Amino acid sequence: MKKIYFLRYSFLLLFICLSNWVMAQSSTITGRIIDEDNQPLPGATVIIKGTSISAGTDVNGYFKLTNAPGGQQTLVVRYVGYESLEKPITTANGLVVNLQLKSSSVLLNQVAVIGYGTIKKADATGSVDVVTAKDFNKGAVNSIQDAVSGKLPGVVITSNSGAPGNTSTIRIRGTTSINASSDPLIVIDGVPLSNVVAGGTANILTSINPNDVENITVLKDASATAIYGSRGSSGVILITTKRGTKDFSINYNGTFSLSVIPKEVPVYTASQFRDLINTPSTFSTPGAQAAAQALLGTANTNWQNQIYQKAFGDDHNLSISGSTKNMPYRVSVGYDDADGVLKTYNFQRTTVAVGLDPSFFNHTLNLHINLKGLYNTNNFADQAAIGSAVNYDPTQSVYNGNTRWRGYTTWTTNGNTNINGAPVTLATANPVARLNETDNTSTNRRSIGNIQADYKIPGIDGLRANVNLGYDYADAFGKNNVLDSTQWIYLPVASGGQKISYNTVNRNQLAEFYLNYKKDLKSIKSVIDVTGGYSFSHFYTEGNTMSSDYNETTFNPSSPYKTEYYLASFFGRLNYTFDSKYILTFTIRDDGTSKFAPANRWGVFPAGAFAWRIKDEDFMKDNTLFSDLKLRLGYGTTGQQDLTNNNNYPYLPQYTISDNASRYQFGNTFYNTLRPGPYDAGIKWESTTTSNIGLDFGFLNGRLTGSIDAYYKKTKNLLNVVNVPVLTNFAATLLENVGSMQNKGAELSLNAVIIDQKDWHWQMGYNVSFNKNKILNLVGSTNPGFVQVNPNSGISGTTSGTIQANEVGYPINSFYVYQQIYDKNGKPIEDGYVDRNGDGQINSSDLYLDHSPNPTVLMGINSDLAYKRFDFSFSGRVSLGNYDYNNVAAGSTYRGLYSSLGYLSNQTTNASVTQFTTALTTNQSDYYIQNASFFKMDNMNLGYTFPTYIKNKLKLRVSAGVQNVFTITPYKGLDPEIQGGLDNNFFPRARIYQLGVNASF
């Protein structure tokens, strides 16, 4: 018993001793966190580094840490809007630590590239948005467009197809022209790029690997873009690539992806198709049903399954950066290989980038050397196979054993009974044959580079001289061959098929010089920043196209071309800041182009802006709600000279040699003639004036930041096509400066740090923009009623072939259609349209302008959530007010099931809804103008970052994600996001699943 008590008391004594020892080793630490004005910072997080011990500050900034381990420790203090602070301490019970944090002003100090210089975002007077690399959309982002999609208010980025390496159309604050370009100017490391790309090149932005980009700055209003004059009317996108670092580092980024089509066009199955053919009410022509039944096959073929595939891709990027003495450097190489979901499509891209930044004479002379190279190959699939897969008879098999057509089932003129007979060229072609019998490839090479020298002139403090010499060279060559055993290129006498080869060279050269003087006049509380310079650019393009039949028995004349133009410019900018609160900016550029006649060659484009930093006023000093508040006002004029037809000599008469069918006979000899083209000697610049008012704001020490802008843009002297009098020896139309157009709207962007704690961090961004486009003047008249059909709005199934037009008072390229009449059940009545002019008959005079393909409201939302080492992000977009013409559905009627030429065609299931059998005007019904508003979840990504290895130098992150996650839309077609609003044979956007790894050392 004594032994038991002895043991009990012994253990109790030992426990007391251990408790006292533990208490002696752990301590309580208190303190206070204040800002630079000695004001308390409530809600700051204080952590003992390497432990889970943390505390938050109270309303007076005080904190208390208990059970702090003894010895040398480090306190980490974090607070939104302030620089994080690490403070080494020696733990002792009762230790009091008071710390002061410095305002980080991350957004205020963010540097924006503005053209011929940089500026702090806080000092910007124009409408400028910046997206840095860390804010890019995560996942399998293989293009710059995908990296920033949904991040920029007022910027619409629409991929023109779902093919890998596809082109994108970018619009900043609406469309600004009818016949000139509305594409923004893209400047990469100081080199403006031409919107003309080498033949077969997917996109000028595919020349740049997004992994090489440090940040993207978008200039939206004229006060910001006027420094680029005639090239800035549609906005400017400035891309800055990553530079060398002080410490040596290696970074690898790899992604492996699987692409699938989200859905197929709903068409009749083979069983449903047979039922339709066997239903008498399907046909309105006597004898048609029996003839159609005789053509039915025995197969059950899903043609869309035959042309689509699960596509794999991989993307690898390796970069090395560091510094050697006075020369930071960065070298990178990237390789992307992706198959398309449409079989036979493949895209491969290799990129190389070198950046060197040596400095001399104690940093008096700084050089920036940039070299970028691109080599890509494209194997283009025949996109017509998409429409063929929708319309080809599902009761037919892929192959039928013929010898003339390489075994592919082909409709022939004798009712398909003689499988080796002549084909019906108007019939739908076998979609599998279209893919396998087409060899359409291109190889593209591009190099962009410049050397920029910045010299601080001795003896004059603040004076710098800058010289920028750059180039942009691209060439491409390719072929588009189709075997002679093809239905769609069939010649009954000569050899069929085709062989087309082409080559193109684009060469742009740049030379710029400017002086910059910046002086802080403290005695009068003023800072002046003056820039003045000269720019000279030379643009040159040449190429050739040659063609023949597949067996090269007949050659067509080659089509060589060569063109060039010059652009010379003087530019200047004055920034004046008074008392760090009032900022004035004046910009001017005088452009001279060889595209216009000497009398109209030069154009002056001025702009002015004012900013007021309200937050820095004395009456706002005690205001703790606002962390930033700035008012911006801007007005300016920019120009446009880039014609969509790439005509570099619109003011000169141009002559073409007539073809052999249009020769004149003199005696027994036939002569080709020179035929003049239309020209206007007085053609001149388009000009766009922009007014902008904006407010930048921040709340709760930068926890919530944002901006709001309202703008009005008016384009005058629109380059538009007008009819010319007869007997002018010209074509029927001429390009002249007539008309005007406006865009007006508003933008709001918000960024919020919702949670910022030790283990949790959650940040969200949201933006919304409104834009309304309207034509004010067309062909020299402001009166409505004159309708100008858009010749580029071609559709299938109509005699006119166009579905869009322009009229005063309407948005550009509105749909031009008949107003459909419906029965009491809501079913469209065949050939039933409203007699809008009341003349008792239905004809083209009853066509009217309906909705527009351009959205009126755009939204973007993104979220970044991190918990310990896990992170999850998503980004999505909303588009409202945009409409599409569903040409796929419009081409599907009972009338189209059978042709008297001896073939059958499948239809979409919409044919059962309309049951149209005879009318020929149904394609132009507003029934097919469908609301294409949508919400798209573009990207979702989940990642995990491993603890650092090898002396905290090796960092590793793995991720999994999905692109094109889902779409919510009332649109009945395959995809509502159609550039131009014409949905026909659209290459579907794939849903992409990816696994990624990022390692850095």
Image: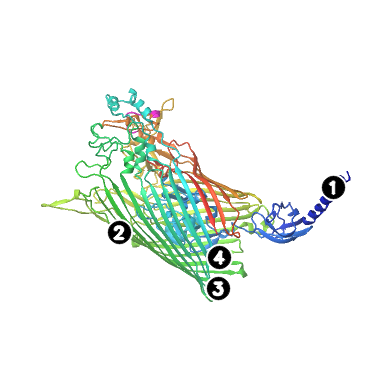
| Residue type at tag 1 | Leu
Point out residue 182 in the picture as x, y percentages from the top left corner. Answer: 42, 51
Q: Residue furthest right?
A: 2
Please indicate, yes or no, whether residue 152 appears anywhere in the rendered image: no
For disc 2, the marked residue is 562
| Residue type at tag 4 | Lys
User: Which quadrant would the C terminus be assigned to in this image?
Assistant: bottom right
Number of the front mark, 1 or 3? 1
Rounded to the nearest angstrom, the CA distance separating label 3 from label 2 is: 48 Å
Rounded to the nearest angstrom, the CA distance separating label 1 from label 3 is: 84 Å
Numbered disc total? 4
User: Which quadrant would the N terminus be assigned to in this image?
Assistant: top right
Between discs 1 and 3, the one toward the N terminus: 1
Please indicate, yes or no, whether residue 592 appears anywhere in the rendered image: yes
Between discs 2 and 1, the one toward the N terminus: 1
Are the two marked residues, 2 and 1, in contact with CB atoms closer than 8 angstroms? no
For disc 3, the marked residue is 461
Q: Helix, strand, or loop for circle 3? A: loop
173 left or right of 561 in image: right
667 left or right of 891 in image: left
Q: Helix, strand, or loop for circle 2? A: strand
**Does the magenta run of residues contain 739?**
no
Point out residue 970 in the picture as x, y percentages from the top left corner. Answer: 47, 36
Residue in front for this viewpoint, 231 or 405: 405
For disc 1, the marked residue is 7
Point out residue 704 in the picture as x, y percentages from the top left corner. Answer: 62, 50
Rounded to the nearest angstrom, the CA distance separating label 2 from label 1 is: 104 Å
Q: Residues within 10 Å of mark 4 (few under 14, many from 20)?
A: some
Based on the displayed image, in which of its 4 quarters is residue 310 positioned? Answer: top left
